[in-house]
Amino acid sequence: MALLPDFVTGNAGLCLIAASCIGATWLYYRRASTLPNVPGPPPSSFLTGNLLDVVAPATGRDWLLNVSTVYGGVAKLGTLFGGHSLLVNDPRALHQVLVKDQDIFEEWSAWTTTNSLLFGPGLLATVGSQHKKQRKMLGPAFSVTHLRVMTPMFVSIARELETHISSMVQNNPQEVDMIGWLTRFALEAIGRGGMGRSFGNMTEATIFSEAAKQLTASLSVMSPGATLTPFFKYLGPPQFRRLLLKSIPWSLLQRLVDIVDIMDDEAKKILAEQQKDLANHDTDKDGEDIIRILLRANQASNEEERMTEEELVAQISILVFTAMDTTSTAIARVLHLLALHPDVQEKLRAEVIEAYHHQDEAVDFNNLSALPYMDAIIKETLRVYPPIPMMFRQTLKDTVLPLLHPITGEDGKVMNEVHVEKGTDIVVNIIGANHNTKTWGKDASEWKPERWLSDLPESVTKIRDLSGVFAHQMTFIAGNRSCIGFNFAQLEMRVVLAILIQSLEFSIPKDKEIAWNSGLLMTPVLEGSSSIHTQLPLIVKKRKI
Ligand code: HEM
């Protein structure tokens, strides 16, 4: 025993569990290790394959794009212990994965298990008929009719945001960390629009807002370890697993456990309040929110369809998780690009001022949707800079993926399709699909809002297989697991732009370089900073109206 390090002798149980996990992972990954003949980048190490290349904060995005350029629509990636997964951006193959054969290409089990451990059995954690049932019940709350009703509430939150920022820059232009403000806006939008309650004053952080803000960043840092979570659920009952987690001396993990507890407590409180209001027939609120609509539908449904209390709580935490950072970083990206391209900013401002004549009270769903230049900027930004650069799927049985654009196999022969074994992980290369030159043309990677103001090429409009739910792109993916909130997100983007651009000007600070880190989500940071602290410092100037 003296030969073993103290940590091992002192934590024998923990080490045994870790060794079993590693062994089980190895066995698991060996099963799906044959993707014969599909070329791909050499793995950086036997232990982690290409996983660390994909999630590398500063280079992950370009790495993904480069692999698509070099290897085409499908490429073999190395995963843990010499295993392989398939990176896909070919339009026909993506259509097969996400739409045509979506029952064969199920959500990645590491992702659903992680989400189930974090939030419980909500949309991001369920599969098959349970997922379908939940999706059907939540769908109506995201309808255009409902969003139309919600618009004035978004406008009022955006005006609060504008008032706060304006007061900071009233006398002189100032550097403002826009991502912080946009995160508060997005949290408040999902709070009031989603849960029927405010998450607090926009200027002061609360325990909940801090927890929600840190969640994505913590998960991004820990994402390579997500591949191990399917085995975690076999490590005994939840109380035991919790004890196990609490005994691991890793501050980031301990913070994650706290965050999850805070979010869960809040979700339970929200549900209890909503149920009470509903029981009291209290409809004296700013229109119907998502959870209220869900509760009504749940109440009206039959026994087999009805969601449990646990499922309802999970939906609340999942909505906060999915709605907040995705949308705030999407708006942040637009503002960053407008600051980099003052001509585009000015043209957008002219369009908005012309439409509203300085009366932002008039901003409504219809007139917001009728601003062609704003529409072009939003579509182009989401295409070139999708906030989520990739997603994952897993095959439930052996199958064949057809390719629209054939590739050359390792044996030098042309491949029109790829045979994929049961258990293979599929990486949906969202950014690769959005930058595909065969679809979007040679300038696919350039940010050109103008491309949306004239006819798009036939390679975009005439391909039946290009099945993204939004603007021919994969940003919100496609099929039954596509983003349920894509119209909600776009509406938030439009409202914030319409309100801020009229009275504020944005430019880049002279002494700071902004970079975007890859991860689960693309996030703005200061160039060279490896920190998980997101920042978007822009110089904001008050316009004289
Ligand atoms: C620009 C902002 C957003 C982007 C880029 C985005 C992107 C995505 C993507 C790529 C997925 C698919 C995940 C998968 O394959 O499992 C997804 C799912 C989802 N999104 Fe969004 N999203 C955004 C905003 C929102 C908002 C505002 C909401 C809610 C109000 C939302 C709610 C959801 C939910 C609940 C799912 C899970 C759907 C399911 O599994 O059925 N998202 N989102």
Image (cartoon, grey):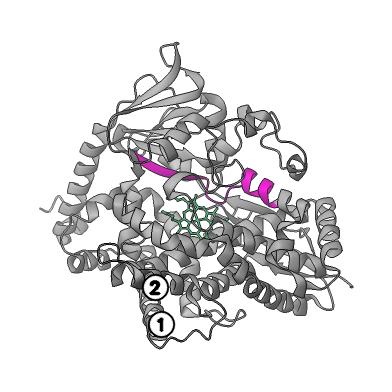
In the rendered image, residue 289, in percent from the top left (x then y), is placed at 50, 73
Disc 1 from disc 2: Cα separation: 8 Å
Say which quarter of the image contains residue 104. top left
In the rendered image, residue 484, in percent from the top left (x then y), is placed at 49, 56
Any part of residue 389 in sight:
yes
Does dot 1 land on a helix, a strand or a loop? helix
Provide the residue span drawn in magenta: 378-394
Q: Is residue 282 left or right of residue 499?
A: left
In the rendered image, residue 76, in percent from the top left (x then y), is placed at 41, 28
Q: Check if mark 1's residue and mark 2's residue have beta carbons within 8 Å.
A: yes
**Which residue is at a point 27% across and 36% down the rendered structure image?**
29
Residue tagged 2: 295
Does dot 2 land on a helix, a strand or a loop? helix
Instruction: Categorize mark 2 by other alpha carbons within 10 Å: few (<14), some (14-19), many (20+).
Output: many
Image position of 116 with respect to 259: above or below:
above
**Which residue is at a point 58% across and 57% down the rendered structure image?**
487
Residue tagged 1: 278
Determine if the magenta segment contains residue 86.
no
Image position of 135 with respect to 314: above or below:
above
Quadrant of the image containing the C terminus: bottom right
Image position of 536 with respect to 447: above or below:
below
Say which quarter of the image contains residue 533. bottom right
Q: Amino acid at mark 2?
A: Leu
Q: Residue 360 has which mark?
A: none
